[in-house]
């Protein structure tokens, strides 16, 4: 039976240098439960090292965790990559790490904390996660698809790091699965503002626990799986976005 | 000032738009945000950027720019060059950084 699922498909963890330690797996899940979020996607900048911890921490809860990443392209466009399986997300991470120059400076950009599901610090990522990869946008999308993932252009309404701010308009022939808007507007408003053939998702891009679920997309699905979300993005078999 | 004179004085490599080099250049515009170039560049400007994505050709065409200088010895993507040839937009390459290229062009344009 199809039913609505509340999904926030773009949140950061304490791995992203621009967040604090309070974006830990348990805090994230507590906040998601308070906001009655059913599906969360973990999208740290250019890394998925904390996805596993959140997946493990969510065991025994009703919340579905999608491993993912927010990749920065050569053009400095942010693209969300979501996967049904952590191994596929890690494959993308390998590819991204090979094309991500620089080392993090904690004093300047912040700490990049790798944790486990018990809130223990396992280490620090020394890659320059805040930086841009040397990968052209088209190649990122192609690679995400080669690992069965979906690609969503991040916050296209924002003035920074969005496909529209960086490239002026959404290039033709791009194989995006959706475009994301921030909490500053509704999907209905976005449909009037942006002329695009892609479906819209709306997410929080949360960097603080209290922001989780502030932006969300309601999907009509049979169950909270990536396969079902893929169908909804294509409006197949009755699955759809109901805003 | 004609584009061909700028190319000669600034030692730029011409990758496309060879028959548009007689065009007059009205000034320069330096930016890597294509949304900003759409909003603020002026007709006949020579655009200085490090972006190599094919959208730069559409933006140059849309704004009737004199051409694009890609800086820092960057190579345009293959589909960018194909599009530049199709649309006959001059794509020029410089080995120097945006600051230097902009400074040289400013000096030439105001002399």
Image (tube, coloured by chain):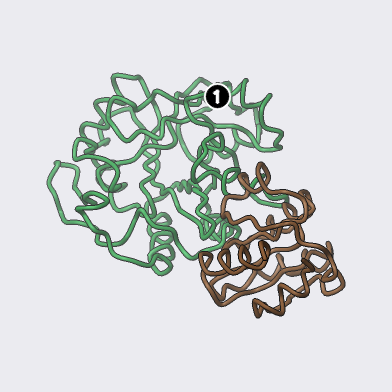
Chain colours: A green, B brown
Quarter assignment of residue B7: bottom right
Q: Give the structural element (helix, strand or loop) at label 1.
A: strand
To which chain does the residue with label 1 belong? Answer: A
- Establish if B104 lies above or below A25: below
Instruction: Decide if residue A95 is on the left or right side of residue A180.
Output: left
- Establish if A178 lies above or below A223: below
- Establish if A228 lies above or below B84: above
- Establish if A193 lies above or below B104: above
Which residue corresponds to the image point at 21% horizontal and 50% vertical from the top-left?
Answer: A111
Can residue A228 be seen here?
Answer: no
Instruction: Decide if residue A237 is on the left or right side of residue A230.
Output: right
Residue at the far front: name it: B111
Residue A93 x/y as whole percent: 39, 60
Instruction: Decide if residue B82 is on the left or right side of residue A35.
Output: right
Which residue corresponds to the image point at 81% horizontal and 62% vertical from the top-left?
Answer: B24
Quarter assignment of residue A207: top left
Quarter assignment of residue A87: bottom left
Residue A229 x/y as whole percent: 53, 36
Instruction: Compare residues B111 and A58 and report the one nearer the observer.
Output: B111
Which residue corresponds to the image point at 57% horizontal and 44% vertical from the top-left?
Answer: A165
* Disc 1 target residue: A220
Q: Quadrant of the C terminus of chain A?
A: top right
Which residue corresponds to the image point at 54% horizontal and 47% vertical from the top-left?
Answer: A151
Residue B104 x/y as whole percent: 59, 69
Q: How many C-alpha atoms fall within 10 Å of the one at disc 1: few (<14), some, or many (≥20)? A: many
Instruction: Compare residues A182 and A106 and report the one nearer the observer.
Output: A106
Residue A217 x/y as whole percent: 50, 26
């Amino acid at each position: 039976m199809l039913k609505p699922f509340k999904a926030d498909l773009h949140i950061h963890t304490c791995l992203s240098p621009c967040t604090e330690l309070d974006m830990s797996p348990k805090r994230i899940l507590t906040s998601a439960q308070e906001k009655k979020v059913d599906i969360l996607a973990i999208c740290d900048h250019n890394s998925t090292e904390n996805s596993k911890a959140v997946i493990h921490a969510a065991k025994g809860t009703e919340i579905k965790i999608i491993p993912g990443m927010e990749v920065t392209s050569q053009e400095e466009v942010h693209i969300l990559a979501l996967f049904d399986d952590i191994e596929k997300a890690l494959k993308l991470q390998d590819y991204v790490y090979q094309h991500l120059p620089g080392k993090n400076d904690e004093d300047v950009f912040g700490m990049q904390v790798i944790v486990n599901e018990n809130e223990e610090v396992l280490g620090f990522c020394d890659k320059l996660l805040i930086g841009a990869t040397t990968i052209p946008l088209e190649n990122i999308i192609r690679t995400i698809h080669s690992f069965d993932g979906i690609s969503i252009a991040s916050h296209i309404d924002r003035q920074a790091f969005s496909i529209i701010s960086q490239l002026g308009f959404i290039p033709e022939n791009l194989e995006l699965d959706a475009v994301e808007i921030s909490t500053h507007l509704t999907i209905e408003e976005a449909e009037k503002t942006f002329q695009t053939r892609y479906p819209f998702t709306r997410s929080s891009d949360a960097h603080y626990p209290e922001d989780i679920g502030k932006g969300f997309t309601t999907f009509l699905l049979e169950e909270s799986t990536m396969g079902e979300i893929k169908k909804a993005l294509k409006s197949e078999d009755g699955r759809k976005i109901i805003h | 000032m004609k584009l061909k004179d700028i190319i000669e004085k600034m030692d730029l490599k011409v990758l496309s738009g060879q028959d548009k080099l007689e065009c007059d250049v009205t000034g320069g515009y330096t930016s890597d945000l294509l949304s900003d170039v759409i909003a603020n560049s002026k007709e006949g400007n020579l655009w200085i950027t490090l972006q190599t994505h094919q959208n730069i050709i559409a933006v140059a065409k849309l704004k009737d720019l004199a051409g694009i200088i890609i800086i820092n010895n960057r190579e345009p993507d293959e589909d960018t060059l194909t599009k530049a040839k199709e649309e006959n937009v001059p794509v020029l390459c410089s080995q120097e950084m945006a600051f230097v290229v902009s400074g040289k062009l400013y000096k030439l344009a105001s002399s």
